[in-house]
Image (cartoon, coloured by chain):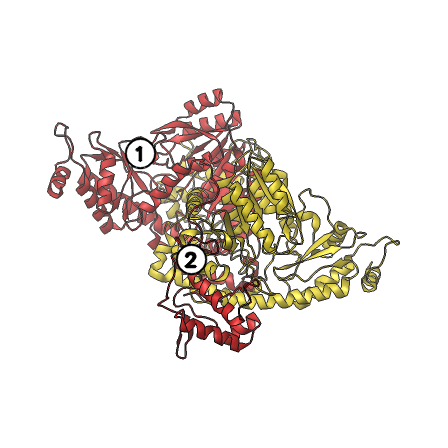
Chain colours: A red, B yellow
């Protein structure tokens, strides 16, 4: 257990009882309150006597009293402990008396609702996945992370001059070495021509979205979003009090003509949130003509384009697609990227690339949000980038994920071809599947859950929260054996389809019958 | 430099020029744009040929062309590099053409002001301290941090089962082992009787303040704050759109009678932000009667009491003072603590202790703010707590800081007794000094800055931003030799006082004259 010092507070106002009785009562009270639990070591009599300013004999008398009443016990050569068999301990909840200092279970003040239900549902989604096999998208395989190299880099940062500079207060925009390494990275790989002044380090892309939303939006403002789309981004935008307007997505990305119409009639429209590289959740890459049109609308209307390039590194086919930000001489694009997908979700390191005045405002805002990032981790990652180790990790991961994409895609065709159709995506970490109309996709997900498999049905990405005949299936997190097991459970959970429906893979139908 | 792959994009629409010319032009363009800088290695001809789908001879022809024009150079046995003496590279700023993809220096959209000036000033304060000797308060000595034990604990976390669970998506409220360790800590040392459900891990106390403010406050709400007080907390509260009402502070803490008056006339008053243990910046400990009165007002009006106990561990005299939260059966107190002060500012680990429904709402909000904390670091700290190592570090630091407090206090009395009076504080990391009325304290700070010493004048804590005859002087960060040097610079920077003023330490006056 913990080794916190026992801190005894004696009540001056006590009724003139002898000091040893006061001490005995104070310790009893702490045991009743739960501050001292069974097995907690009590301080030695000399230590306690000195901290209370009493004679040691007084403490010994108090301990004898407590021991006689069964509150404490002395174990030979090991010291004095709170007894494991305490005579009478009131439960915290039922204690009632104002002197009992158990924490309240309820708040004594009111909190406004402000989207609480939607946020609670997002939390519930995350918690529901714990301990299950998860076939959701966007989950890297953390087993690939170069954990030992990372831990060595952390040690190097901490041992350099005692780690003093890495441990002191630092720049809310991030440590200079990582900003420089990221500027070099986006210049080399994304054509952004950025310098340190264009780059801010954030805690993953989510913090970048939340910080920029707080900077740019307020109550009454309007922001356009892709729909289907990414719910955690929507919620960050909504927290500002802004209203969201959904823009449809098709096989060439977000519908820019529709955006232009909305821009023409909504004077409070401030900007648009997009995922052009691999649209979330449909995996579509935005077409070149749409890209140009989007930048034109934004420039003409002075809208921001919040470009979330959350998995830039994972593109497996053809030429690399440069982000919108690489073709933006007017400073309308605020570019968001992350290393959390190429490394591990728990290593929260993302970045914003934007015109320097925007970076300065974001950094000033962050000063009061969480003061600064994890400079030890961030400097360790700068080291790994400078050494080329992260680049090697990305290349290796890209190779592994490309294979897993092919494998999952082939498995799905083979085992579920009749009910689920999906194109092999050009990049990303997930397949976007269309489910045959007569299959209830939500029922499928619910039945899969009973078999310990998490599926993401289309409803999870819908602006109206209604069902959609889609599944988003992640291929990055599972090795081939695991992927086969996941698909086996999918097949086994397939709900019965109406007898009148056409077609269907005989294999899937057979599988369904044989396990129902 | 970085080892990012060169990603060449050939323009399909080019005017039918031979492939090798197209390649040569594309590389030239990248050099002009700054995507390829002097010294960057170019890919081998085989690699580039394969990625472009052309014959290797085509690439070799392009490289010969570029080499002839001086764009690239081949170093024997080392490969081909962008030339150090590039014929003509336009500066990014002056390039002008829409095809140049240097990032814009200006934003193409507008950002609302929303306190930008105040936030920028806060940032400027932080930056102004860099590289100087800083006698400000609240700065721990990071040289005392057990950096090697911490780095070993990080390695242990990362190597346990490949670090997989620590690296995957986790609970926004923090990893269970650290929540348990913190619950045990606040139960043993602060009398809070908390369980895991009462505790959320945050990134330092600043994130706790910002998250709770976003949860509890909105435009039109009112919140009371101590004045003098802590500006970064004020700014976090203001970001919600709430209005702040200052409450005066005296030698017994915040004026609760005044708070009650405001509560009676302000229907939108939602709560109060306080620092009862060592009031920031005056170091005063709130009196017992004020504490009871504050809790009574809060309970009666359903106000929250946001209790910031930022340096609980550092109390050097008499009995430990338990926080307000330890005497709150009604759930009005939201308690904020931090490990960043006992460890290092850059290790952002703080915590909120509050009724479970408040913790759940905070965690759900955090889900979209930065997803989750640094679980690797947080699990490493849980290990250090379970081993008792952090407890040992706290005891050691407390001893060192108590000595430094005594030393700085004695030095100030001896060297500046005539112009600066301060009581020896019972705890914390700073002395609160009153400066003689006829000394211009802001001029003193400005003159000290010229000597490389940062001082915090009273104005920095004033709600109205006006001058106050005070200095807050940190004693934690400097060893005795450094403290003597800091005080020497203080004496040397003392501005001239008017000849008519009474008294003044002859020593300080002498020092002032001898260095002026």
Measure how far apart labels 1 and 2 are at the Cα level: 35 Å
Disc 2 element: helix
Rate crowding at label 1 as few (under 14), some (14 to 19) or many (20 or more) other CA atoms within 10 Å: some
Q: Quadrant location of the C terminus of chain B? A: bottom right
Q: Give residue B472's position: percent from left, percent from top.
A: 68, 55
Q: Is residue A39 left or right of residue B37?
A: left
The residue nearer to you, when weighing B275 against A418, is B275
Looking at the rendered structure, the number of numbered marks drawn on it comes to 2
Q: Quadrant of residue B267?
A: top right
Furthest residue in direction right, as rendered: B500
The residue nearer to you, when weighing B305 against B66, is B305
- Disc 1: which chain? A
Q: In which quarter of the image is residue B502?
A: bottom right
Kindly identify which residue carries mark 2.
Answer: B178
Is any atom of residue A475 visible in this view?
A: yes
Q: In which quarter of the image is residue B23?
A: top left
Rate crowding at label 2 as few (under 14), some (14 to 19) or many (20 or more) other CA atoms within 10 Å: many
Which of the labelled discs sits on residue A459, or is there none?
1
Q: Residue at x 60, y 35 (%)?
A: B265
Q: Is residue B57 left or right of residue B293?
A: left
Which of the labelled discs sits on residue A135, or is there none?
none
Disc 1 element: helix
């Amino acid at each position: 257990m913990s080794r916190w010092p026992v801190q005894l507070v004696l009540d001056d106002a006590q009724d003139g009882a002898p000091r040893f009785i006061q001490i005995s009562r104070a310790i009893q009270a702490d045991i009743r309150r739960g501050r001292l639990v069974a097995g907690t070591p009590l301080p030695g009599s000399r230590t306690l006597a000195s901290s209370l300013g009493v004679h040691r004999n007084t403490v010994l008398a108090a301990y004898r009293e407590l021991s006689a009443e069964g509150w404490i016990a002395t174990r030979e050569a090991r010291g004095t402990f709170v007894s494991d068999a305490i005579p009478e301990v009131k439960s915290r909840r039922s204690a009632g008396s104002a002197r009992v200092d158990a924490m309240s279970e309820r708040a004594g003040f009111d909190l406004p609702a402000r989207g609480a239900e939607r946020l609670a549902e997002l939390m519930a989604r995350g918690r529901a996945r714990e301990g299950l096999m998860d076939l959701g998208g966007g989950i890297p395989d953390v087993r690939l992370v170069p954990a030992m190299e990372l831990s060595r880099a952390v040690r190097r940062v901490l041992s350099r001059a005692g780690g003093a500079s890495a441990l002191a207060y630092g720049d809310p925009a991030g440590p200079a070495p990582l900003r420089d390494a990221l500027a070099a990275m986006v210049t080399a790989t994304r054509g952004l021509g950025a310098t340190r002044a264009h780059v801010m380090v954030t805690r993953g892309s989510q913090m970048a979205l939340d910080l920029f939303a707080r900077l740019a939006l307020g109550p009454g403002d309007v922001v356009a979003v892709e729909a289907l789309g990414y719910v955690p981004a929507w919620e960050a935008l909504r927290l500002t009090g802004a209203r969201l307007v959904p823009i449809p997505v098709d096989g060439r990305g977000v519908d820019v003509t529709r955006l232009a119409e909305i821009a023409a009639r909504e004077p409070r429209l401030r900007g648009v949130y997009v995922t052009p590289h691999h649209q979330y959740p449909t995996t579509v890459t935005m077409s070149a003509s749409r890209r140009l049109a989007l930048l034109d609308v934004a420039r003409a209307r002075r809208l921001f384009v919040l470009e979330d390039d959350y998995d830039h590194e994972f593109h497996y086919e053809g030429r690399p697609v440069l982000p919108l930000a690489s073709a933006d001489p007017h400073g309308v694009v605020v570019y968001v990227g992350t290393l959390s997908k190429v490394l591990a979700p728990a290593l929260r390191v993302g970045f914003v690339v934007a015109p320097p005045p925007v970076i300065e405002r974001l950094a000033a805002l962050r000063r009061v949000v969480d003061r600064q990032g994890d400079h030890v981790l961030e400097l360790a990652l700068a080291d790994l980038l400078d050494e080329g180790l992260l680049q090697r990790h990305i290349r290796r991961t890209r190779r592994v994920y490309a294979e897993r994409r092919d494998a999952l895609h082939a498995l799905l065709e083979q085992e579920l071809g009749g009910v689920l159709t999906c194109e092999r995506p050009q990049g990303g970490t997930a397949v976007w599947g269309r489910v045959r109309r007569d299959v209830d996709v939500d029922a499928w997900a619910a039945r899969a859950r009973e078999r310990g498999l998490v599926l993401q049905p289309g409803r999870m990405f819908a602006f109206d929260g209604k069902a959609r005949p889609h599944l988003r299936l992640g291929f990055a997190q599972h090795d081939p054996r695991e992927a086969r097991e996941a698909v086996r459970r999918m097949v086994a959970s397939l709900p019965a389809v109406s007898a009148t429906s056409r077609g269907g893979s005989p294999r899937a139908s057979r599988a369904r019958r044989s396990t129902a």
